[in-house]
Amino acid sequence: MTLLARDANGPTITAQLLVYPNTDHLSDTPSGRQNDDALFFNSRSVESYWSNYLARPADGADPLASPLRAAHHRGLPAALVITAEYDPTRDEAEEYADRLAKAGVPVQLTRYPGMVHGFFAMGGTLHAGRRALAEAAGFLRTSFGPATG
């Protein structure tokens, strides 16, 4: 959405909150190969998600679906990228954060050690999940500024 909004001159998007995002539909990374958990989140899961997301497999080459494939990342809104150490999407998400930073976009990247894909939704059980939720809330609070009314 941020690429589309930037290239269409609006609407203005204030910030990107990206929690272990998939950023390239054909990603083949060390984290993807090393963290292929047969029982939880794995390459087959990712493939299934992409097949539900894309109208046609060829659509995955479009930067609007795979933002790592964008020609450039200048002019995008500030971002918080949250990753998990044992997540197949970790490397591509961190590469996206790196590309944003190299393009001059304010970006904060936090990798949660010892965590797997899905930990962000487990704040009621995992301390790291609570920390990540608090980090995300703080980022959004700062990005949107004080409430007016």
Image (cartoon, grey):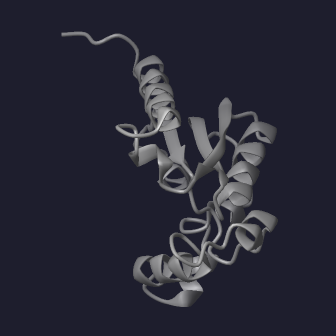
Q: Position of residue 52 (x, y in %)?
A: 40, 81
Location of residue 29 by image quarter: bottom right
Left or right: residue 146 compared with residue 79: left
Give me the residue at 43% from left, 37% from top: 12
Residue 7 vertical position relative to residue 111 in the rendered view, above or below: below
Q: Position of residue 51 (x, y in %)?
A: 47, 84
Give me the residue at 69% from left, 67% from top: 35
Q: Position of residue 148 (x, y in %)?
A: 25, 10
Give me the residue at 42% from left, 85% from top: 55
Q: Quadrant of the image for the C terminus?
A: top left
| Number of numbered markers | 0
Residue 149 vertical position relative to residue 39 in the rendered view, above or below: above
Residue farthest toward the left in the current orientation of the protein? 149
Viewer-side residue, 29 vs 142 = 29
Viewer-side residue, 144 vs 82 = 82
Left or right: residue 91 compared with residue 24: right
Residue 63 vertical position relative to residue 107 in the rendered view, above or below: below
